[in-house]
Structures are given as C-alpha cells and as structure tokens.
Image (tube, rainbow, N blue to C red):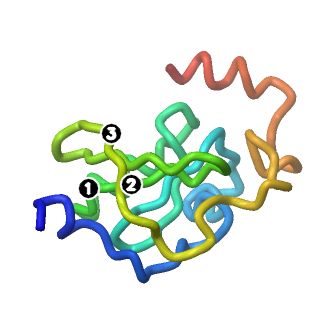
C-alpha cells in the first residue's frame, strides 16, 4: 500500500454536483475537484475562490480527483503530482447538463475578465 492510499476512500460519494463553498456564498466556479478522502466538491485553482485547494490545505486531505465529465485524473498536493487512481463512488462528475462555468444562472457576463484578473 502506498502513502497516497491513506488519503483515498473509494466508498465515499461526492458532497454534491457543485462547489459546496461557492454554493454557500452564492458564487460560481470554472471547474470542479473532488476530495478523494471525504468527497468534498470544491472549485479549481482557475476559479475565483480556489475552494478545492483550500479544502486540501485546511483538512489535510491531500488527494483530489477531477470532477469534470470525461476526466479521471488525481492530484496529490503532498507530492504535487498527477496520477491514475482507483474508481471512486458515483457519481464521478458533475452532471453533463451543468454548464462550465457554472451554475449558469450565477455566471456573470464578464466571467473571463474576472478570472483573468484573479490569475
């Protein structure tokens, strides 16, 4: 068993279809990441709030998986590497009907400018 296995629980479902923290503040996201340990869904580092990384650093849950349709890569914040991992509990992505960025009703018309200014 490798070190990273301690940070992955294949039986835990995701917390929901969108960034839990953006939902709380009424914000929007670009892409989503899922904590491989507790299922917390957070927004990516290209999003305004970077909730996925914040969760990893504050919780100590150092492995995330993309929560985008068609993507199955994992990221280990401890080693800063991408790797292939096990199949996690479904669902494995946000609904394909959900827009990117999303959710559609909260995405501002100038979203690209906002993200460029956040880089």
Q: Residue 77: x and y, percent?
A: 25, 45
Q: Give the residue drawn at x 38%, y 74%.
A: 38
Q: Is residue 24 above or below residue 73?
A: below
Residue holding disc 2: 64
Q: Residue 10: x and y, percent?
A: 39, 75
Residue holding disc 3: 82
Q: Which mark is residue 62?
A: 1
Label 2: how many Cα within 10 Å (few below 14, some 14–19, many 20+): many
Q: Nearer the viewer, residue 114 or 64?
A: 64
Q: Residue 80: x and y, percent?
A: 23, 37
Q: Give the residue drawn at x 61%, y 55%.
A: 22
Q: Is residue 96 above or below residue 5?
A: above
Task: Tell me the CA gap for discs 3 and 2.
Answer: 10 Å
Label 1: how many Cα within 10 Å (few below 14, some 14–19, many 20+): many
Secondary structure under the numbered disc 3 in the rendered image: strand
Q: Give the residue drawn at x 45%, y 67%.
A: 87
Secondary structure under the numbered disc 2 in the rendered image: strand
Name the front one of labels 3 and 2.
Answer: 3
Q: Residue 53: x and y, percent?
A: 38, 47
């Amino acid at each position: 068993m490798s070190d990273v296995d301690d940070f992955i629980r294949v039986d835990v479902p995701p917390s929901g279809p969108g960034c839990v923290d953006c939902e709380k503040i009424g914000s929007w996201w670009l892409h989503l990441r899922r904590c491989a340990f507790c299922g917390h869904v957070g927004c990516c580092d290209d999003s305004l709030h970077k909730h996925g990384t914040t969760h990893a650093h504050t919780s100590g849950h150092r492995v995330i998986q993309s929560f985008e349709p068609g993507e199955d890569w994992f990221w280990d914040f401890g080693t800063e590497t991408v790797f292939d991992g096990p199949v996690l509990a479904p669902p494995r992505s946000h609904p394909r009907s959900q827009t990117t960025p999303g959710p559609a009703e909260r995405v501002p018309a100038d979203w690209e400018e906002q993200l460029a200014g956040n880089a």
